[in-house]
Amino acid sequence: MRFHGNTVTTLSSPVGQTIILSKVTQHFHTYPFLLHAVLELTAAHLTCLDGQDTNFAATAFHHTQHAVRLYSERLRCVKDRTEMDAMLAACFMLTAIFYLSHDKFNATESWIFRDSDSTSKASWSKVLCGPALLLQSAEFRDNAHESSWLPFIRETQELVRQATTRTGPGDLVTMLRDLISESQVDDNNAHFEDITEKNPYLPVLEALAPVLRARFDPGTLTFGPCVDVADFVSLISFPSRLDGAFIERLSRRDNIALLLAGFWFALLAQLQHCRWWCLRRALTEGTAIYLYLSTVQSQEWKFQKAVSILAHTFCS
């Protein structure tokens, strides 16, 4: 089965893959939402490998609709630990599908620049936080010590911890931190160094900083391939670290918030682990952000330099 041999390797770390294959797959026929999630992810993978085959695309769409509906129905009435484990697996798969963008750049598909009053599609930030929200739910926490996903959770925590100890050229991170410190945090012309507790940007930069340091080449102004499992975990979990204040600034197209999001997408475009489901999304969003920021009239050289770095990723 393609899912076992190919698709699952793009979904999670080796520990997560082992859990899915050894623990979760035995419940395919117990939980229809999980079966449909597996089938939609596999069909979507085949569509990306052979874009001419519309049968796979139609199959992926069919199973996605069923998986989302059945998953949503069970979300409020999970019975036990086994079902919660299956829910978490399905959530990972549905999140991967949500990333999919079939065009390198299509402004109408952009999450960031979608009309803020649009009610026809789910909030991208909430959807991407789905796995984190499940892990934080009372139903999961009550049974976490028995969960099949416990080794994965521990591995993820350790990988994030390891990522924070990485070293590398810090010029870009320092420049972005200076730019943030010089930016106004509210309408009272207050600065971040004066009221750091109200700073919506610094936590976001700190979440990106380890991978920025490890992958940015100051000589070429480009990012190298993100090949480590720690890169994958840090970048895919990044949306769960965005608070409401930052999301609100993104929605009103705040320049600094867009810039930081642009660097996340620039790094996401370098992920080797899951390119088929995240690359085009990263290029769609990153290109849209760069084109918007390139029209901003700013005399701040740090801002101009940061935008030029995005250009090397999205306009090369």
Image (tube, rainbow, N blue to C red):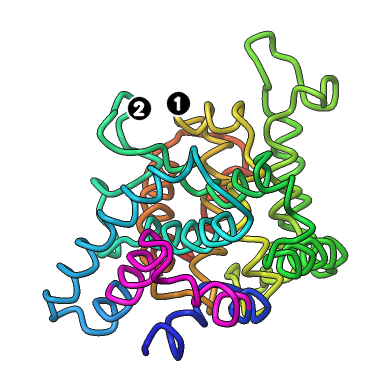
Residue drawn at x 81%, y 70% as measured from the top left: 168
Query: According to the image, label 2 marks what residue?
Result: 116
User: Which mark is in front, 2 or 1?
Assistant: 2
Residue drawn at x 25%, y 54% as measured from the top left: 65
The image shows residue 171 at horizontal and vertical percentages of: 77, 59
In the rendered image, the quadrant that contains the N terminus is bottom left
Q: Out of 101 and 212, give the one closest to the viewer.
A: 101
Question: In terms of image quadrants, where is residue 212?
Answer: bottom right
Query: According to the image, label 1 marks what residue?
Result: 252
In the rendered image, the quadrant that contains the C terminus is bottom left
Label 2 to label 1: alpha-carbon separation = 8 Å
Give the amino acid type for the residue marked by disc 1 in the picture. Arg
Q: Which residues are magenta?
A: 19-43
Give the amino acid type for the residue marked by disc 2 in the picture. Ser
Badge 1: residue crowd in 10 Å (few <14, some 14–19, many ≥20)? few
The image shows residue 200 at horizontal and vertical percentages of: 68, 30
| Residue 260 in the figure: left or right of residue 106 | right
| Contact between labelled residues 1 and 2, with CB atoms less than 8 Å apart | yes
Q: Is residue 42 magenta?
A: yes
Q: Relative to 19, does residue 294 appear above or below in the rendering?
A: above
Q: Is residue 257 magenta?
A: no
| Residue 315 in the figure: left or right of residue 209 | left
